[in-house]
């Protein structure tokens, strides 16, 4: 098989060049047979995609070649993964079948290709709520038996993000929001840090380009100064370590744009105030793995000889490596210049795992039998989650929520009374811990001794806590416990516990309920029982029988609900089924090429966009079009699940419309400030104020002001005016982003 003539001569040359780059960066073990199979896959893909072009006009084949190169070069994977990357779109976009791939390239390659193939409406016997969610569930289920599925998917997504500029804006928002919600966190959990930060930056670039360019420029302006300060900070430590016979190399690291912006938003700081926008890293040459911890802590001790540490910001990932294999000591020291410096101490092995994640596990597997334990633990959680989803028949969107809840949060380590380490998502409670150990322990939990101190079941656990669960045979699982749980696995076990507990009341409750029906002369039909359950928001008839058995539903309830003279089952059913699915009459649509007219649509209160802000419009079936900032968390959540519902939008409001904006103002606490602020807003700028709240914090005052404005320009003018008040130190808009 050769390259077909649908490619120009220049394109054939470029394809061969890219294929040779792929072979060159393929560093894992390979022989002539491996190369021959990869070459066959390359030629098959080139012929299968011979007539396809990307939006940029380039041959589509450039894409699978780029994905395979990422798999080989940036992830360090081998033959099967490279073949799957080359063929990952063949089944989805051409006439070749999975059986053909299986016959020519083996079962594993075919399974990976199948795992990354998108689902369509034709794959379902009835409509689905979100094809995006269904496709993601398929990827995760495939990943649960072969990790290479998600690696190919991540490589595919990374190249798509790198070439996203040729896509229309609404497609950019769909792909970027899905990436930041799902794929970037997965890359992080697999330890693919380089992939994760590149995805994060590309997402910010397309979701909020103004912010991306602004932060990028600010970093550029201070880069030389900051890097020079870090070099001066590291010099004496490096010299002393070398005197002690410890070989090290040092690096001055600039954080990526998105992580700096995240810190700026989270703490309400300017870039100059973000102390860890630049990081000092020291990497120890320690060939003997048994000496790693000792040399890391010796290096830390040398730092303390020259600089004062901030013990509150200390993070020991050497003693407690993350489940993605990440190990390092994070410490913050006060430099001689009076600045706090984020410092990372690690060995060469730790650094390679931190940078390359999953691929580095294979290299160190033979040297360290525990090298894969973190990944194995994470994959076991994935498999359990998939199994629970199958058993409970959860929807794809519920599955995504569970996956994010359990596997995307940062983790903490806690200990059993015997000293065994348990890994849980950050935010987990005593009850999560109990259910993690055993369902019975959770079902009968009444509290716990945390570090020998008695604590209730809803207490949130912290890193390093030792937890002893206290149980009682009289305790039973309760519905209100769902509010105390942070993990989907614990919620699933609680759900099963409640179900099993209530089964014991079925016969008693059913007998009592029949007596109530007979007394009221009402037919004891399934229809009437279902109606009664629906009125009390109960999921099953067993729940209904339980409520009757424990006297939460009595004879009077039955008669009141089922004997109402104006009750009609058919009318109730119609109302029940159609509630919330009627389009509001105010919703307007336009075929205007510039987009949908926003007037008359719902302006989301979660981010409060105003005219002049970048916005995205999301049109879900049966609901008003929602207007959000593109970087609003709720908007990104919706776009990652309902990308096809994104519509173009433009502002079409006159001066008679007013929008609520909120400002946070930090000022010196001095008498008269409130009056000056009020005068500036209402008298000088002639704006209506909805609310103003002021709170003293030592010698400072924090004012939260909500004011009505017509557009972004009006708000910017107000901010500039407030900044000119002598006592004011900082003004920022809140409720807008992340």
Image (cartoon, grey):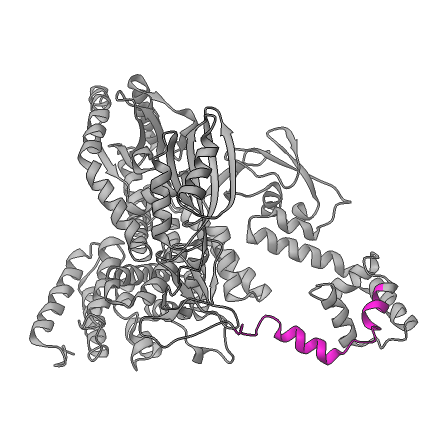
Extreme residue in the right direction: 519
Quadrant hosting residue 159: bottom left
Q: Is residue 170 visible?
A: yes
Left or right: 697 with respect to 329?
right
Residue at image point 25% right, 49% down: 213
Residue sticking out furthest to the front? 683
- Between 270 and 89, which is closer to the camera in this rendering? 270
* x and y, in percent, of residue 489 in the image: 57, 53
Q: Residue at x 49, y 55 (%)?
A: 605
**Foreground pick, 520 / 313:** 520
The N terminus, quarter of image: bottom left
- From the viewer's perspective, is residue 273 above or below residue 601? above
Q: Is residue 570 magenta?
A: yes
Q: In the rendered view, tell whether residue 171 sits above or below residue 605.
A: below
Looking at this view, name the residue that lies furthest to the top. Answer: 305
Residue 233 picture location, percent across and down = 23, 25
Number of on-image labels: 0
Q: Which residues are magenta?
A: 557-585
Left-right relation of 81 to 683? left
């Amino acid at each position: 098989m050769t390259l077909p003539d649908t490619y120009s001569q220049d394109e054939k040359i470029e394809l061969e060049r890219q294929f040779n780059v792929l072979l060159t960066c393929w560093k894992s073990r390979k022989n002539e047979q491996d190369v021959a199979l990869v070459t066959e896959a390359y030629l098959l893909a080139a012929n299968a995609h011979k007539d396809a072009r990307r939006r940029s006009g380039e041959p589509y084949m450039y894409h699978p070649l780029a994905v395979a190169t990422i798999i080989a070069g940036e992830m360090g994977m081998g033959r099967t993964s490279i073949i799957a990357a080359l063929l990952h779109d063949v089944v989805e976009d051409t006439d070749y079948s999975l059986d053909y791939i299986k016959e020519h390239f083996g079962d594993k390659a075919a399974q990976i290709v199948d795992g990354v193939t998108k689902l369509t409406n034709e794959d379902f016997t009835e409509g689905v709520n979100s094809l995006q969610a269904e496709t993601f569930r398929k990827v995760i289920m495939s990943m649960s038996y072969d990790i290479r599925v998600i690696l190919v998917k991540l490589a595919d997504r990374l190249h798509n993000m790198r070439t996203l500029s040729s896509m229309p804006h609404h497609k950019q928002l769909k792909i970027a929001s899905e990436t930041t919600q799902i794929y970037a966190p997965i890359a992080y959990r697999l330890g693919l840090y380089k992939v994760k930060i590149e995805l994060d930056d590309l997402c910010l670039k397309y979701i909020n380009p103004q912010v991306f360019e602004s932060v990028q420029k600010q970093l550029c302006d201070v880069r030389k100064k900051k890097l020079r300060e870090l070099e001066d900070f590291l010099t004496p430590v490096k010299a002393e370590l070398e005197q002690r016979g410890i070989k090290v190399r040092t690096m001055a690291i600039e954080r990526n744009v998105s992580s700096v912006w995240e810190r700026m938003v989270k703490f309400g700081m300017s870039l100059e105030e973000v102390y860890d926008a630049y990081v000092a890293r020291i990497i120890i040459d320690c060939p003997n793995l048994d000496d790693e911890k000792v040399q890391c802590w010796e290096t830390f001790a040398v730092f303390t000889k020259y600089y004062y540490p901030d013990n509150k910001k200390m993070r020991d990932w050497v003693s407690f490596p993350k489940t993605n294999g990440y190990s390092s000591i994070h410490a913050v020291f006060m430099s001689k210049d009076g600045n706090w410096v984020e410092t990372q101490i690690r060995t060469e092995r730790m650094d390679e795992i931190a940078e390359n994640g999953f691929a580095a596990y294979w290299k160190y597997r033979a040297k360290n039998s525990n090298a894969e334990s973190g990944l194995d633990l994470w994959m076991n959680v994935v498999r359990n989650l998939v199994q629970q989803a199958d058993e409970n028949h959860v929807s794809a969107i519920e599955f995504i929520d569970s996956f994010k809840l359990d596997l995307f949060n940062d983790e903490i380590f806690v200990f059993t009374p015997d000293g065994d380490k348990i890994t849980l998502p950050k935010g987990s409670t005593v009850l999560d811990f109990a259910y993690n150990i055993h369902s019975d322990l959770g079902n009968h939990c009444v509290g716990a001794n945390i570090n020998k101190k008695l604590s209730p079941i809803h207490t949130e656990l912290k890193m390093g806590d030792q937890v002893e669960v206290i149980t009682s045979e009289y305790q039973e699982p309760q519905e209100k416990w769902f509010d105390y749980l942070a993990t989907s696995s614990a919620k699933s076990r609680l759900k099963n516990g409640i179900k099993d507990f209530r089964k014991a009341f079925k016969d008693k409750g059913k007998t009592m309920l029949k007596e109530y029906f007979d007394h009221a002369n009402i037919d004891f039909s399934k229809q009437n029982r279902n109606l009664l359950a629906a009125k009390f928001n109960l999921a099953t008839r067993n729940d209904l029988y339980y409520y009757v058995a424990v006297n939460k539903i009595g004879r009077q309830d039955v008669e009141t609900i089922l004997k109402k003279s104006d009750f009609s089952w058919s009318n109730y059913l119609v109302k029940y089924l159609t509630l919330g699915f009627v389009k509001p009459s105010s919703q307007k649509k336009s075929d205007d090429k510039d987009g949908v007219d926003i007037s008359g649509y719902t302006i989301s209160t979660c981010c409060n966009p105003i005219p002049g802000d970048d916005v995205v419009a999301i049109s879900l079936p049966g609901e008003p079009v929602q207007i959000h900032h593109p970087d609003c968390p709720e908007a990104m959540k919706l776009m990652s699940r309902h990308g096809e519902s994104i519509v173009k939008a433009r502002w079409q409001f006159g001066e008679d419309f007013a929008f609520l904006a909120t400002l946070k103002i930090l000022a010196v606490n001095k008498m008269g400030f409130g009056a000056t602020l009020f005068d500036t807003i209402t008298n000088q700028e002639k704006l209506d104020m909805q609310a103003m709240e002021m709170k003293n914090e030592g010698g400072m005052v924090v004012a939260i002001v909500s004011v009505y404005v017509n557009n972004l320009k009006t708000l910017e003018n107000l901010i500039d005016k407030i900044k000119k008040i002598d006592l004011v130190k900082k003004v920022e808009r809140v409720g807008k982003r992340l």
